[in-house]
């Protein structure tokens, strides 16, 4: 794309290429809308059933997370993204250390194994933050080779990804691990791995998955989630129950939904983890197809903007950042919503922007911040 | 470099296509769930969170004709287990210990409970997953408190208060009142179309009035549809219909009379057992076992049952809260005395001589006897004590005799009834055949009077009795030639039928309704046991049961006069040097007030091979407009005139002199028994003892003395 640099006006107010003139408001709007719906849904599912004493704790906390997230998004957008390249290894090392730390000092979380630090009244999930760090690190490594990676470089990139994946798998948190796999595949696909590499990697991935399954690396409940997904009728397990109840909730929402705060499945707490990983069931039950489609539409918008920004990015690093964020979002979205719809097995993955949780919210906003950053600077050539 | 290269664009397109495909599948799935299958899921969601709870309504009471409460309700504490909680909270291998612990605790309060009962309740598949399964009923309040306080130790074990049947008069009228029990699977299916919403293990009438008037007695359960969460916490009440109590049933029974009838029946049977055994023709000793019997008192003018006693009896309260299977087997053991059998309507007895009036009616009705008949009613027949069928005088099977070959000399119809001459009726029977009247003339008359078919009393499981006929004999033979080897009906069969022997069987209730027709001029009523259904709210009758006249038999004075006269002679004609009425002595012995309360009747003594005679008496009075028909049947107890007639005579006398004792409730009787027992122990008369127990309020000093005396008395008793 033509990038006129000669005419740069040194007064940034008059510079048509100035970053702040190119903020992607549509993207910001999508994230804020999703967050707002998320806060409302969290309120609906956590407020309790006593109209005289609705519980607003979760909603208030999530509001704080969203505000902090928005601030973080802004911060991530402001610092020119090429500087992230140099900071990334530092964050990466810190992230790996925290993953090790969590295994030693962490606490058991809800659906996600031992993946949490308890800090004050809040819990911190380092693997969430590491997703963004990994997007930056991987993009930076791949971009350095200008789309022409040889075997050694590819292996190095893969090792960079494999370390956090293994640490997360040990927690065990298969879902988050798979997010890393998705990011890796997306960035490598776009960022220059050869087609043969991709095919080979896919085969390797399948073999690794079979190996893990056969050696019993998955815990009982993880195996159960998979078996109950493939054969839901035979299973009397908690996972099958969850999946059935989630679909009942969404299906009974119908076209127009049962109304905010009126969902029977939601009020009755029939769906477990409803304010976190299963938040989409509240949307489905209370807001109906209209609400579900709106939420999916907003995510589609968000992902389209990331995809579009990748194409328009001023350099490969920027493009890969967007691709990494996009694949992360697509995978999380597809997995977390898909499992409530019964088209994916259950794994503990939050819906970006909507699920209750500070780590997830901050990570999602930071990721979008990266895309905004690239979008704002798509006319600035280095 | 950027992605704006051929390869970069292609790779981005692949990525975009993958993302698009994933989104498309999410949209498609959401569409499928929410738009196409919405209704399915709405139904499932309702099933998830809506529960219908049933609130049982109290059952209606059963009252006697004077509104004395015969069957009442009382609150009872029941221990239940919540299967869901036990399954989720107690490990399989810990459950036996829990059940054992629970059985021990319950048993320690005096309500003996086996572990197996709890295990059975837990294993029962008759209850839904959230139902409270009853384990034992009638536990103490202490246990209820204890279980509530130790709910940690007994997860899923709860108590609830239910209403159960209570019988203020103890076992009185047990057979007619019946009992209730838990609705079983078969009954559940049968209740599918009933309006009052039955559930497995609901209380349902199993016999007697409880069964027959189930639809009135049962309350309409209340229902509430509640919204619950996953943990069965109630979120909201969506619908509520309050329970409506069942209606009371007012019987035609007079409990005072009922209890007297039961007592007289029992006393007569117990007395009969004391008689020395008879010796039969072969020299065998035949004891008077007197195992059971029945008494029926019926108002012949409207067909209302006033009392209906059956012995032996049982205590209906053993069924409260569920009867154990051993106890039930014992009650219904075929080899025992069958206390559950209501002999008044289920006992089938050879009516013996009490059947003779109907043979007489057959003769009058066919024209064998009567003013325009072959024989005159007053024409004497020479009773020599033995009768030979004229066509085969030399065949021993054609020889019939009176009891003990007793000759009565010249008897006409009237006297034949009074003294109970058999040969007179043999002669009538033989003449039906000889003069070519219908061979089954006697049977036709019997059926007209209601024999051979249930009377239609408003109680379940009434037996029909049996009237043998030529056609019936043929059919029986063809169906089972081994058991019934003789297909032919002979004159001798008519002869034994004419005196209510042979294959003739009748229930005491049938005898009562047949004699009621004799007493009321020929009207056959289907007897009523209930007079009204009373609204649970107002106590006013919401439904009254009218007399149910089935038919009017042609019974003109020329028929009725000789029969009634003959039956009147049974109680009136002095039975001394000259043979007289077979029940005269029974009435004379108790100075029956014939002048104010004239009654007629007929004794019967029926034979059953190898057993002592069955004693029967049927009487009615006061004449001319009889208000009571009384039937007494005593199994293996002796002659009707000696054993059965006194029972009815005493009842009639009490009615005539208005001296039927007011019935005491079980509590009152227990108190009387206690006083009598303690008085006897203390060596005091009942009056003295009562005076001691309830000192006259004449000052503190007297009080103190009285107490001292009582204490002394009991300590003496203790030493003794």
Image: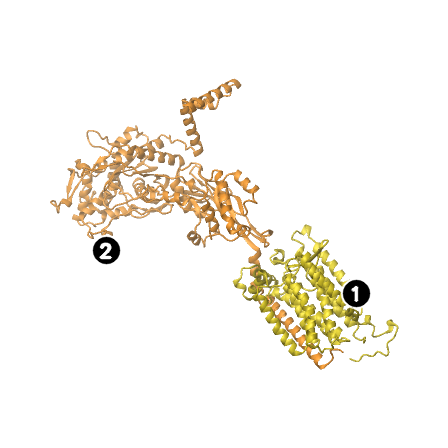
Residue B293 visible in the shown view: yes
Write down the residue under mark 1.
A75
Q: Residue furthest front?
A: A152
The image quarter in which residue B148 lies: top right
Quadrant containing the N terminus of chain B in the rendered view: bottom right
Image chain in orange = B
Percent x, y for residue A256? 64, 64
Q: Residue furthest left?
A: B394
Mark 2: secondary structure: helix
Q: Which residue is mark 2?
A: B478
Q: Is residue B622 above or below residue A274?
A: above
The chain assigned the colour yellow in the figure is A
Q: Residues within 10 Å of mark 2 (few under 14, many from 20)?
A: some
Query: In the rendering, at what x and y percent does residue A153 appear?
Result: 70, 74
Q: In the rendered structure, the residue with mark 2 lies on which chain?
A: B
Camera-side residue: B371 or B81? B81
Query: Residue B533: image x %, image y %?
Result: 45, 44
Chain letter of the residue beneath label 1 in the structure image: A
* Left or right: B341, with A130 as reference point: left
Provide residue B158's location: percent of width, then percent of height.
53, 45
Task: Point out which mark residue A30 bears.
Answer: none
- Which residue appears farthest toward the top when viewing the image? B701
Q: CA distance from mark 1 to mark 2?
A: 107 Å
Coloration of the structure image? by chain
């Amino acid at each position: 794309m033509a990038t006129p640099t000669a005419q740069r006006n040194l007064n940034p107010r008059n510079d048509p290429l100035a970053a702040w003139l190119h903020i992607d408001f549509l993207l910001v709007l999508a994230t804020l809308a999703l967050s707002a719906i998320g806060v409302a849904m969290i309120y609906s599912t956590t407020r309790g059933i006593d109209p005289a004493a609705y519980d607003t704790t979760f909603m208030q906390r999530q509001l704080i997370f969203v505000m902090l997230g928005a601030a973080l998004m802004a911060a991530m957008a402001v610092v020119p993204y090429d500087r992230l390249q140099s900071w990334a290894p530092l964050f990466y090392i810190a992230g790996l250390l925290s993953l090790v730390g969590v295994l030693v000092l962490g606490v058991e979380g809800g659906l996600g194994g031992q993946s949490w630090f308890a800090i004050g009244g809040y819990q911190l999930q380092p693997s969430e933050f590491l997703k963004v760090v990994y997007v930056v690190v991987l993009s930076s490594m791949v971009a350095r080779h200008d789309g022409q990676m040889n075997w050694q470089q590819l292996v190095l990139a893969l090792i960079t990804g494999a370390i956090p994946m293994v640490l997360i798998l040990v927690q065990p948190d298969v879902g988050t691990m798979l997010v890393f796999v998705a990011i890796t595949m997306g960035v490598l696909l776009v960022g220059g791995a050869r087609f043969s590499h991709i095919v080979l990697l896919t085969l390797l991935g399948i073999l690794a998955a079979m190996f893990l399954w056969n050696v019993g690396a998955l815990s009982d409940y993880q195996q159960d989630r998979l078996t109950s997904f493939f054969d839901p009728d035979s299973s009397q397990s908690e996972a099958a129950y969850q999946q059935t109840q989630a679909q009942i909730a969404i299906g009974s929402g119908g076209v127009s939904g049962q109304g905010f705060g009126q969902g029977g499945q939601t009020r009755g707490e029939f769906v477990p983890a409803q304010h976190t990983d299963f938040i989409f069931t509240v949307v489905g039950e209370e807001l109906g197809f209209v609400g579900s489609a709106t939420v999916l539409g907003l995510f589609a918008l968000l992902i389209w903007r990331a995809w579009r920004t990748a194409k328009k990015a001023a350099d490969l690093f920027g493009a890969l950042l967007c691709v990494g964020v996009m694949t992360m979002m697509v995978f999380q979205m597809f997995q977390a919503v898909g499992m409530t719809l019964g088209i994916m097995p259950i794994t503990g993955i939050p819906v970006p922007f909507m699920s209750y949780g500070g780590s997830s919210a901050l990570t999602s906003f930071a990721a979008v911040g990266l895309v905004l950053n690239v979008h704002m600077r798509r006319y600035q050539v280095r | 470099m950027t992605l704006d290269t051929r390869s970069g664009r292609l790779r981005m397109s692949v990525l975009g296509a993958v993302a698009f495909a994933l989104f498309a599948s999410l949209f498609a799935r959401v569409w499928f769930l929410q738009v196409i299958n919405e209704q399915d899921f709405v139904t499932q969601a309702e099933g998830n969170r809506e529960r219908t709870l049933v609130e049982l309504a109290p059952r209606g009471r059963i009252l006697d004709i004077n509104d004395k409460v015969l069957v009442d309700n009382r609150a009872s504490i029941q221990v239940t287990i919540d299967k869901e909680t036990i399954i989720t909270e107690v490990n399989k291998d810990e459950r036996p210990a829990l059940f054992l612990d629970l059985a021990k605790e319950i048993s320690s309060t005096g309500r003996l409970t086996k572990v197996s009962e709890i295990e059975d309740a837990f294993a029962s598949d008759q209850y839904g997953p959230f139902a409270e399964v009853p384990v034992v009923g009638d536990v103490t309040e202490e246990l209820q408190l204890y279980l509530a306080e130790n709910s940690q130790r007994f997860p899923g074990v709860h108590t609830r208060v239910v209403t159960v049947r209570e019988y203020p008069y103890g076992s009185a009228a047990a057979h007619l009142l019946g009992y209730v029990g838990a609705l079983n699977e078969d009954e559940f299916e049968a209740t599918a179309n009933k309006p009052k919403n039955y559930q497995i293990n609901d209380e349902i009438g199993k016999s007697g009035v409880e069964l027959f008037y189930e639809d009135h007695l049962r309350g309409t359960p209340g229902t509430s549809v509640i919204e619950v969460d996953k943990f069965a916490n109630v979120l909201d009440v969506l619908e509520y219909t309050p329970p409506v109590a069942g209606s009371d049933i007012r019987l035609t029974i007079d409990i005072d009379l009922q209890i007297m009838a039961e007592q007289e029946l029992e006393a007569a049977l117990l007395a009969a057992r004391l008689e020395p055994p008879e010796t039969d023709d072969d020299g065998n000793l035949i004891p008077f076992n007197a195992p059971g019997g029945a008494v029926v008192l019926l108002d012949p003018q409207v067909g209302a049952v006033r009392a209906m006693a059956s012995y032996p009896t049982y205590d209906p309260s053993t069924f409260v809260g569920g009867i154990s299977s051993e106890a039930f087997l014992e009650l219904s053991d075929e080899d025992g005395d069958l206390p559950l059998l209501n002999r008044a309507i289920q006992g089938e007895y050879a009516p013996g001589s009490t059947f003779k009036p109907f043979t007489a009616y057959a003769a009058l009705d066919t024209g064998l006897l009567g003013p325009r008949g072959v024989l005159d009613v007053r024409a004497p027949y020479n009773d020599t004590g033995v009768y030979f069928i004229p066509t085969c005088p030399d065949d021993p099977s054609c020889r019939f005799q009176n009891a003990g070959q007793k000759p009565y000399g010249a008897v006409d119809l009237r006297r034949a009834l009074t003294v109970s001459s058999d040969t007179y009726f043999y002669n009538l029977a033989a003449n039906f055949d000889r003069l070519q009247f219908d061979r089954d003339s006697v049977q036709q008359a019997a059926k007209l009077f209601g024999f051979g078919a249930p009377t239609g009393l408003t109680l379940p499981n009434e037996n029909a009795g049996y009237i043998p006929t030529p056609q019936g004999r043929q059919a029986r033979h063809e169906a089972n030639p081994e058991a019934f080897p003789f297909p032919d009906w002979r004159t001798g069969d008519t002869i034994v039928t004419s005196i209510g022997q042979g294959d003739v069987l009748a229930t005491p209730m049938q005898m009562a309704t047949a004699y009621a027709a004799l007493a009321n001029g020929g009207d056959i009523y289907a007897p009523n046991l209930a007079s009204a259904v009373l609204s649970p709210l107002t106590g006013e009758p919401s439904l009254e049961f009218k007399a149910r006249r089935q038919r009017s038999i042609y019974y003109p004075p020329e028929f009725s006069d000789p029969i009634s006269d003959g039956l009147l002679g049974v109680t009136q004609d002095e039975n001394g040097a000259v043979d007289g009425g077979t029940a005269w002595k029974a009435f004379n012995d108790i100075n029956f007030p014939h002048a104010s309360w004239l009654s007629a009747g007929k004794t019967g003594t029926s034979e059953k091979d190898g057993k002592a005679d069955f004693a029967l008496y049927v009487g009615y009075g006061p004449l001319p407009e009889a208000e009571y028909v009384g039937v007494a049947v005593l199994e293996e107890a002796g002659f009707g005139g000696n054993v059965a007639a006194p029972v009815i005579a005493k009842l009639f006398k009490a009615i005539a002199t208005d001296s039927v004792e007011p019935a005491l409730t079980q509590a009152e009787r227990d108190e009387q028994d206690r006083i009598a027992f303690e008085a006897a122990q203390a060596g005091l008369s009942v009056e003295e003892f009562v005076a001691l127990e309830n000192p006259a309020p004449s000052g503190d000093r007297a009080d103190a003395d009285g107490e001292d005396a009582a204490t002394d008395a009991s300590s003496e008793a203790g030493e003794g």
